[in-house]
Image (cartoon, helix red, strand yellow):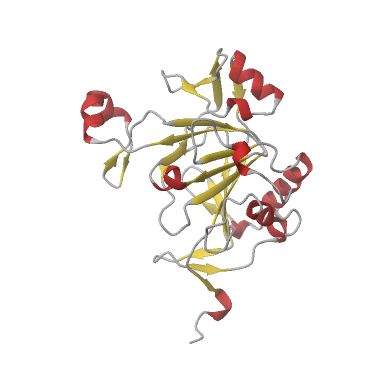
Amino acid sequence: MDANFDLSQWQVPGADAAFYIPNFVTQDEEAYLIRKIVEAPRHRWKQLANRRLQIWGGEMTNNNLLIQSEMPAWLNQCPDIITRLRETGAYANSAHGAPNHVILNEYQAGQGIMPHQDGPAYHAVVGTISLGSHAVFHYYEYADDDQQRDFGQSMRHEDVLTGGRRINPVPVLSLLLEPRSLIITTSKLYSCHLHGIEPLETDSFSASSTGHAVHQSSTTPYKIANADLIQGSQEQDLVREGGSLKRGTRYSLTCRDVEKVVNRKFMGKR
C-alpha cells in the first residue's frame, strides 16, 4: 500500500467514523486466501449455531486478556494483510498500531448475524475484509425511552434485546460490502452502535438514483450510504437501477487490536 495512503478519501458519505475501501485485496489474493481458509485443519474451525469460524492471533480469556499466538503466514507474510491494515492509519492510536487478533467467519447464503457490539477488550477500530461474496452491513443504535414509546406494538415484535437494552430495528447506516473490500469502523460508530447482517439468500435493490436496498424481510428502503464508493460494475448497476444479487459463501476477516496481551510462551513463568 502507498506510504501516502489517504484514508479520508474512502470516508462513507454522512458517516465520519466509517471508511469503505473497495478492492483492498486483488482477485488472485482473494482466491489464495479462500484456499488457505478452506484448507485449514478441522480443529481450527469452531461451529456455532448459525455459522462457523476460525480464530487467529490467540485466545481471549474471561478478563479480556489475549493469550497471543502467531498469525498464519497467509495473513502476515504473503499477502501481508496485517501490514496493509497498519498502513491505512486506522489503527495508529491503538496499543500495537495494527490488528493482533483476527476472527474469520464463514457465512453461507441465508446466514447472518444479529445486531451486536464487539466489546471493551478491543481498541475502538475494526477492519472487516469480505471474501467470496457480498453482504449488506447494517449499523443500529439502542432505542431510548421516547423511541420505545413511539415504536409501541411494533417494537415488541421486531426489536432485538441485548443486555436488557432495546435496539431500534431501523438501521442508522447501511452499506453494500463487495467481495475483496474493507470496511473500517471507528470511534462512536464502533463503541456506541451495533452492527449486523440479515439472514437472507438474496439482496434486492429498488430502482433509485441514490441507491436503496430493500431486503426481503423489510418494508422500509434502506439507503446504501457507500453507493458512490462502489466499484464493481454489477453492484453499481444494482444500487442505481435496481435488481437482485444472490449471496454465495462469504468469508469475513474481522481484524482488531486487543490491548491487553500476554505471550503464550511466557505463561506460567513468574
Q: Is residue 259 above or below residue 117?
A: below
Q: Whole-percent x and y of residue 16? A: 50, 38
Of the pair 255 and 5, the residue shown nearer to us: 5
Q: Quadrant of residue 145?
A: top left
Residue at position x 69%, y 22% in the image? 234
Residue at position x 49%, y 41% in the image? 17
In the visual, does 209 lie left or right of 78?
Answer: left
Q: Quadrant of residue 23?
A: top right
Q: Whole-percent x and y of residue 39? A: 70, 53
Q: Residue furthest bottom?
A: 270
Of the pair 140 and 201, the residue shown nearer to us: 140
Q: Is residue 226 above or below residue 185?
A: above
Residue 114 in view (yes/no) = no
Residue at position x 55%, y 34% in the image? 12
Q: Residue furthest right?
A: 28
Residue 245 in view (yes/no) = yes
Q: Quadrant of residue 129?
A: top right
In the visual, does 57 lie left or right of 147?
Answer: right
